[in-house]
Every structure is written in structure tokens, then in C-alpha cells.
């Protein structure tokens, strides 16, 4: 590895790789690591920066991953700080935080697929933050590559010139050397004042059992060194820098970080709330240090209840959520109690995939067995008194007599699909209450479809259905468009007259009978038979809109009667009937957890 001290601020480049999902970001990062000899050959493997088992299994990047590389061009050594970013729309917040720590971005476009929805979204994010963008056509080695067509598409849609666009293969390494040279030539060095007091931006963090909270920082001004007393301006936390270092890509202590550098600082603090993402690190005891802009807090769009299968695991779930929140600032949670499921947390997520990833990380990394309730969206309720109340669960919905209007969130959905699937895509969007906004051809065979639709219609099976009707060729991006009035009602599920709060849902009034019937049917199949009939009802207020009955087990009380007087048999049957009626009045219905899990998997029609 090259010697660090000789490299100045002018020979530092901070950049990230942005692209649509599966366009080759992590594979390109592998080639860069090989080219700069950051890792020995024995340490290399595919997608080496995707360190989480969940990332490797799903083949997607979930967390942004920083790494330091040293690149020699001629006789000049350059320090390259790379941040590999996620591509899925649910992790756009991760991308925005990575962009804030950089001066440039490499925008990858798959030569076989062309510009996709997240290509546009990430490019606009980079432009909004004033970054220098290097457009790159990747996967030029594939037989189906349309390199010239995609190159022209980048110029037409994003406004680059032909000379700006590079061509590479992240798999074979072709063109990667030229890209490295372009990074050094085009991306400006970091600005900042080495002589000024320390100012560093916390752009991510993690928890280490030995180091405590480890903050990932970009030094904007001054120097950060081991033993320095620090002050976090936003959280008003005071600590000492016990360890300072770089990502290589694992933690590697260097003792100091200069102006414009990206690295980490550990203080040994165990309080996971002490280092909030977006905070400014300053020297302790120095007055007048202006805080950095930081980040706008991410707004959760999807809410669900998260409960431990074993009630004794509630404290462990709280501790796990606290640690995960440190590494995932988009996650929101607060305690809640369910009559059916016990103590748990009401959690807010950026989307359905984000919800799925959080659940899997809790189960894998913290060995928890969890039950997650039906996801809901945030709604705005205008009460009869003229107040606007925000609710994110059915239990928070006021009494219908107190509601003047309910507004639900609508999204602007951009879908890029081959021309052959325009009809099925539009039909699917119309079926989910979508409203057409725009249809634009990006090239003769690919089209951009823009619709607005309720977020609630996107919670169950939306992305899977989109992939199904387009045979996997469509891509999607979405953003909040605002709130609109809707005819929404609270649908309650009752078993023998007792409500199951965990299965309550806020649904469109016209869809309530169908959803209620499906929930009742699933519960009927899962609830074991008792010695009395069990009524499973779906109701809106006092009106039952669907009902199923779990039939009673019947004991053969006539088995000992071998002929004889028929009145004897009638007496036994009447006695059994009276006993069942009395049992139905006082008996408790046992509902196994499997019944809740089955009911919570209901998909929208």
C-alpha cells in the first residue's frame, strides 16, 4: 500500500457509485479494489463490500459501504474515498447521505437495460447536491449489450455529451482504468480549511461491542485525531476520540483524519443515541463553531406492529431496535400493546422492502422470533372540531361520528417498461385506483409511464405483480405527491364477539366486504374447533359485513344407547345442546399464533 502522509488534500477524491438496482455497482467496486491493490487477492471475493449475509443472499446492497483506496497515476498518488450505495427506491435515504459526503458520483447504466427509474432518481439527487457526475455504460461485454443505443439515451435523457460518457465492464475490468483516471481528472478535490477548527459530518454509524458507538465521518474543516476532546453540537454530547481510522474496507486505525478525508471515530460510548446521523463533530471547548447543514429527517411512509413471539423477548426486541436504529436512522418505533399479541412496537418504515429487511435483520442478527402486523399508511383525519390528527394505526382512528374527512397519502409512480407491456401495466395501475399523468418514449422500444396512486394500494404484492405482468423487465421509482380525501373505514375482526385489535385495518369502504371475507375465511381455517360454534365476523362499526362459523366438535352422547326408548336419546341430545349454549356464553376461544400469521398474510385484490 502507498504511504499516506505524502498525500495532500489536493490529491484526495471523494466519490460514490450510484445506479439502478443490479446495474453493477458492487462489481465495479470489486474491480477498483483490485486495481488499487487495496485488498490482497486471497481476500477478494465477489461483492466484497456487501458484508451483510442478507445483502449477499438477496444480491442487493442495503447499506452504503465506504472504503479507502490509494491510486497511483504516473508519479502522483491520489487518495480515493469510495462509497458504494444501494439501488432500491426504499434505500434512497442511504444514497442521499452518501452523496453529502462526496464531491462526485459515478452514474452506472446497464448496457442491456438502459436508463431505469432509479437511474433518473439518483442522478437528480446528485445534481441537486451539486456533485460532478461521470456517466458510465456498464456490462459492455454481454452479447445483448446495446452500448451505442444506451450511450445516446444517456445523452438525450440526462443531457450529457458523447465525450462525457465512458464504457466499461465491471466484470472483466475493461475500461475501469480509464474510469479511475477520469475520477482523478474530473472530480474536484474536497474544499475545506485545514487551519480552521474541526468540523466533521456524521453520515452513518454502527455499534461495536468493544469500541462502542462508531461514527462514520467526513471531515469538512480542521483535523480529527486520537485523544482529542470532541463535542457533538446537535446532541450536546462530549467525548474523547479513543480511536480514529479509515475503512480498508474494515476498520483500520490511523490515529488522525485530515481535512476532506472520510473515516471513522470511536469514543467507547455505549449510549447509542449519543451519535445521531447528521450531527456535527467539533472540538470541545471551542466556541462559535457553526454546525453543518446535516440531513432532513426521513419520513416513514409505511407502519406496522412488531411483536416478539415470546413475550419474554420484549426487552431483547427493544435493545435490538435501539442498535438497528443507530445503523438505520430511517427506522422509527414506539412501544404499543395489543390484546392479542401482547407488548410490542409500532414501527415506521420507508417502504415494504425496508420493512422486510428490518424484520429479517432483527431475526438473524439478534436471534428473535417476530410477528409483524398488516402494514398501514399514515392518514390525516380532519375532525368535526376542525383539528387535523395524524394516525398511523387503526387504533388511533377517532370515532366515526367525530370524523369530517380522512386523507390518505398519494404517490407519483414512474415505471419504465418495454413497449409490449404498456397495456398490462396501465391495467394494473388503473385497477389500483391509479390516475394517468404521463407516457413518454425514452427510445422506440422503451417507455416511461407516470401515474399517481394511493400508497395503500402499493403495500401488498404491487412490485411482484408489476414484475409478473412485465416478465421482470420493468423498473419503478416513486415519491410522495401529497394527501387526498378518501372514503376510508376501520374494519374490525371479531371472534365470538371479541375484537382482535391486531387484525384491524383501515380500508376503502367499497373493498371492506371482500377483505373482511378473506380474513374471516383464513381465521376459520386456522382456528381449532371447540365444543361450541365460533363466529368469526368482519365489521365496520356495528355493521357486520362478512361472517364465517367454525363448527363445533360434537361428542357422540348416544354411543352407549343400544336401542331402547327414543325419549332417552332426546334427553341426552337436549342436555348436550344446553351444555353447548352455556359453554358458548362463558367459554374462551383459543386462537393459535399461526392463525394470526395466516390472517396477516392477506393480499389485496
Image (cartoon, grey):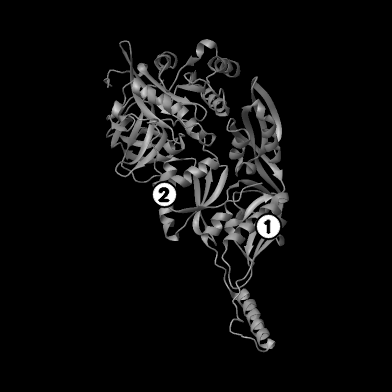
State if disc 1 and disc 2 touch (CB < 8 Å): no
**Image location of residue 505, percent across then percent down:** 63, 53
Name the spot of residue 280 as percent of width and height, x first: 41, 33
The residue that appears at 53% across and 41% down in the rendered structure is 353
Corner quadrant of residue 530: bottom right
Question: Is residue 418 shown to the viewer in this render?
Answer: yes
414 over 235 or under it: above or below:
above
**Which picture quadrant has residue 352?**
top right
Q: Secondary structure at mark 2?
A: helix
Locate residue 316: give its quadrant. bottom left
Specify the quadrant that holds the N terminus: top left
Within 10 Å of the Cα at label 1, are there few (<14), some (14-19), or many (20+) other Cα atoms? few
Q: How many neighbours does mark 2 have within 10 angstroms: few (below 14), some (14-19), or many (20 or more)?
A: some
Indicate the secondary structure of the residue bearing disc 1: loop
Residue at image position (38%, 26%) is 30
- Foreground: 44 or 488? 44
The disc placed on residue 470 is none
Judging by the rendered image, the residue that carries numbered circle 1 is 399
Spatial CA distance of label 2 from label 1 is 35 Å
Q: Nearer the viewer, residue 137 or 12?
A: 137
Figure disc tally: 2
Describe residue 431's horizontal placement relative to residue 307 as left or right: right
Q: Where is residue 543? Give x, y as percent.
A: 72, 61
Q: Is residue 200 visible?
A: no
Give the farthest residue toward the bottom: 565
Q: Which residue is mark 2?
A: 320
Numbered disc in front, either 2 or 1: 2
Q: Looking at the image, is mark 2 or mark 1 earlier in the sequence?
A: 2
Vertical placement of 109 versus 525: above or below? above
Amino acid at each position: 500500500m502507498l504511504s499516506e502522509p505524502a498525500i495532500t488534500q489536493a490529491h484526495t477524491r471523494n466519490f460514490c457509485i450510484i445506479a439502478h438496482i443490479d446495474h453493477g455497482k458492487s462489481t465495479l467496486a470489486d474491480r477498483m479494489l483490485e486495481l488499487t491493490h487495496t485488498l490482497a487477492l486471497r481476500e477478494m471475493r465477489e461483492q466484497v463490500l456487501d458484508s451483510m449475509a442478507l445483502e449477499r443472499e438477496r444480491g442487493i446492497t442495503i447499506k452504503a459501504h465506504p472504503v479507502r483506496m490509494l491510486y497511483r497515476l504516473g508519479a502522483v498518488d491520489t487518495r480515493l474515498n469510495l462509497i458504494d450505495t444501494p439501488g432500491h427506491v426504499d434505500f434512497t435515504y442511504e444514497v442521499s447521505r452518501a452523496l453529502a459526503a462526496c464531491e462526485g458520483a459515478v452514474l452506472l447504466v446497464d448496457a442491456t437495460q438502459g436508463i431505469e427509474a432509479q437511474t433518473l432518481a439518483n442522478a437528480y439527487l446528485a445534481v441537486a447536491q451539486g456533485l460532478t457526475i461521470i456517466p458510465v455504460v456498464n456490462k459492455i461485454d454481454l452479447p445483448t449489450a446495446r452500448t451505442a443505443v444506451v450511450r445516446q439515451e444517456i445523452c438525450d435523457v440526462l443531457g450529457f455529451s458523447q465525450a462525457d460518457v465512458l464504457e466499461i465492464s465491471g466484470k472483466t475490468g475493461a475500461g475501469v482504468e480509464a474510469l479511475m483516471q477520469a475520477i482523478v481528472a474530473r472530480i474536484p478535490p474536497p474544499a475545506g480549511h485545514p487551519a480552521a477548527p474541526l468540523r466533521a459530518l456524521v453520515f452513518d454509524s454502527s455499534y461495536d461491542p468493544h469500541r462502542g458507538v462508531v461514527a462514520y465521518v467526513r471531515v469538512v474543516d480542521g483535523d480529527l485525531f486520537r485523544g482529542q476532546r470532541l463535542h457533538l453540537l446537535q446532541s450536546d454530547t462530549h467525548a474523547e476520540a479513543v480511536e480514529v481510522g479509515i475503512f480498508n474496507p474494515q476498520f483500520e486505525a490511523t490515529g488522525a483524519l485530515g481535512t476532506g478525508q472520510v473515516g471513522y471515530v470511536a469514543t467507547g460510548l455505549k449510549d447509542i443515541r449519543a451519535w445521531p446521523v447528521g450531527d456535527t463533530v467539533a472540538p470541545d471547548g471551542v466556541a462559535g463553531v457553526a454546525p453543518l447543514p446535516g440531513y432532513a429527517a426521513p419520513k416513514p411512509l409505511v407502519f406496522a406492529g412488531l411483536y416478539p413471539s415470546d413475550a419474554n423477548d420484549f426487552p431483547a426486541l427493544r435493545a435490538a431496535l435501539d442498535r438497528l436504529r443507530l445503523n438505520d436512522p430511517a427506522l422509527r418505533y414506539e412501544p404499543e400493546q395489543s390484546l392479542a399479541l401482547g407488548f410490542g412496537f409500532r414501527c415506521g418504515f420507508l417502504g415494504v422492502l425496508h420493512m422486510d429487511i428490518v424484520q429479517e435483520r432483527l431475526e438473524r442478527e439478534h436471534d428473535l422470533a417476530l410477528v409483524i402486523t398488516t402494514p398501514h399508511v399514515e392518514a390525516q383525519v380532519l375532525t368535526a372540531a376542525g383539528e387535523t390528527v395524524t394516525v398511523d394505526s387503526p387504533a388511533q382512528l377517532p370515532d366515526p361520528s367525530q370524523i369530517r374527512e380522512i386523507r390518505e397519502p398519494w404517490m407519483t409512480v414512474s415505471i419504465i417498461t418495454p413497449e409490449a407491456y404498456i397495456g398490462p401495466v396501465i391495467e394494473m395501475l388503473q385497477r389500483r385506483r391509479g390516475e394517468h399523468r404521463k407516457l413518454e418514449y425514452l427510445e422506440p422500444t422503451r417507455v416511461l409511464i407516470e401515474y399517481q396512486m394511493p400508497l395503500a394500494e402499493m403495500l401488498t404484492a404491487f412490485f411482484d405483480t408489476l414484475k409478473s405482468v412485465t416478465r421482470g423487465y420493468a423498473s419503478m421509482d416513486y415519491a410522495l405527491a401529497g394527501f387526498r380525501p378518501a372514503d376510508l373505514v376501520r374494519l374490525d375482526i371479531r371472534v365470538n364477539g371479541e375484537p382482535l385489535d391486531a387484525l384491524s385495518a383501515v380500508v376503502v369502504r367499497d373493498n371492506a366486504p371482500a377483505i373482511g371475507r378473506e380474513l374471516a375465511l383464513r381465521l376459520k381455517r386456522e382456528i381449532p374447533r371447540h365444543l361450541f360454534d365460533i363466529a368469526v365476523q368482519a365489521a365496520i362499526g356495528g355493521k357486520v359485513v362478512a361472517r364465517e362459523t367454525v363448527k363445533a366438535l360434537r361428542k357422540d352422547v348416544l354411543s352407549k344407547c343400544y336401542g331402547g326408548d327414543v325419549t332417552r336419546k332426546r334427553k341426552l341430545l337436549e342436555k348436550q345442546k344446553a351444555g353447548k349454549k352455556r359453554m358458548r356464553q362463558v367459554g374462551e376461544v383459543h386462537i393459535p399464533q399461526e392463525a394470526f400469521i395466516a390472517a396477516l398474510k392477506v393480499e389485496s385484490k
